[in-house]
Image (cartoon, helix red, strand yellow):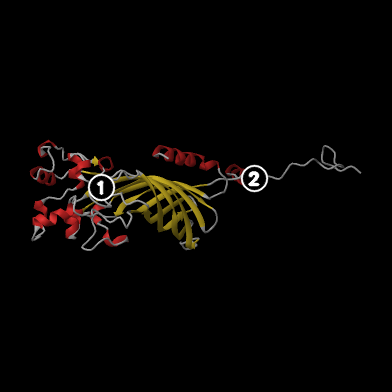
Amino acid sequence: MTVHKLFLLFATLFVGVTALHGQYRWDVGIAAGTGHYLGDIGGEELTRRDLIFDLHVDQTKFSSHLFARYRFNNIISLKGSFGTVFTEDTDRATINKDRVARNAHFRNRIYEGSLRVQGIVWSRPNMLPYQFRRNISGELYGIAGLSYFRHNPQARITQEAAEYQYNQGLISTDPASFDYDVWYDLRDYQTEGVAYAKSSVAIPLGMGAAFTLNKNWRVSLEMVWSLTFTDFIDDVSTTYADPETLDDIGRVLSSPTHLELINDLGISDSETYIQNHQYSDAFNSPRGNPGRNDAFGTLQISVSKIIKYQSSFSRRNYSNKRKKNGWKAPRRNKPRGYNKRGRARF
């Protein structure tokens, strides 16, 4: 399923929502906030740790979604959403020497469509004192679901790496001819010799808090972490690709390390150490950790409008027009026994 089909599916849901039954059960809105990533790039001084322990605040990006939500009862809701999550990270942001020496970086734009179940764990019908005319209700809820997403990791050529490989005779292209401002689609160059899929699925998990004003507007704060079934959001997973299968651009993208960087790290035998971050016929030099898949997350604020659907009975008996005109007694025919002047006949 393409991104365009996903968008069309969500648009159909969005447009048709007002025709569905259930007063106050539907709300539609927009969410915006941050985008985060956790994978083989970046981290701190140790190998990868889960959740917030390896997040780089300075690599925080943007996310936005459109959504529609249906409330089955006072506890369970189902939310369908479609949006974009931007992610980015670099080995320059870590203090792990092995990752710094690898010198990898990436950016990725993730198009995501998801269905999420929300279960309320705490709620309060009215959080204001009773003398206030307005009503603000609050609730806390957990989130779990399934999402489908498409992604396209990109990176730029590192000039120092291109110059190093040119001087070593590993590439034949003059480094001066490269455009170092261009972002290249890494999947097209198969930097690890793997043509991985452009799409995958994830399991979003999280929690949220919502406040509803007069059953008209709902403001929510949600933190969601998506566990994916791919290790290539950052294009780093296994080992370096055989240079014989790559062109010059692919070789520099696959191994962006260079000797100057190794020397800056204070490595005693830099000539030998740099081989750990290049392809080798003698051993499989690891480029990433295929044992742990990548993940991405969002922290978003959303605003939604509650759909006030009324049944035909409600419209007929409790509509605004009916309330405005007030109640009128039904007209009845005069009972028998009265003449035109209203006098009784005996």
Q: Where 107 falls versus 121 (above or below)?
A: above
- For this rendering, which residue is in front, 248 or 81? 248
266 vs 209, nearest the viewer:
266
Return the residue found at the far right.
346
Q: Which residue is mark 1?
A: 192
- In the foreground, 143 or 50: 50
Among the two numbered marks 1 and 2 on one chain, the one whose residue lies closer to the N terminus? 1
Quarter that holds the N terminus: top left
The residue located at (35%, 51%) in the rendering is 230
User: How far across and down, in percent of the image, does residue 279 sit?
Assistant: 19, 50
- Total residue callouts: 2
Residue ID for mark 2: 313
In the rendering, which numbered label is found on residue 75? none
* Disc 1 crowd, CA 10 A, few/some/many (<14, 14-19, 20+): many
Q: Label 1, label 2: how many angstroms apart (C-alpha)?
A: 65 Å
Residue 91 rendering spot, x and y as whole percentages: 20, 54
Nearest to the observer: residue 158 or residue 137: 158
Residue 191 drawn at (x, y percent): 24, 45
Image quarter of residue 168: top left
* Type of the residue with mark 1: Glu
Q: Mark 2 belongs to which amino acid?
A: Phe
Q: Secondary structure at mark 2?
A: helix
Residue at image x 24%, y 57%?
56
Write down the quadrant of residue 19 in the picture: top right
Q: Is residue 322 left or right of residue 123?
A: right
In the displayed structure, does residue 270 sit left or right of residue 253?
left
Query: At 63% from the left edge and 45% from the top edge, which residue is drawn?
Result: 326
Q: Dot 2: within a 10 Å radius of its alpha carbon, few (fewer than 14), some, or many (20 or more) residues? A: few
Question: Element type at marker 1?
Answer: loop
> Given the current orientation, which residue lies at the most extreme top position?
177
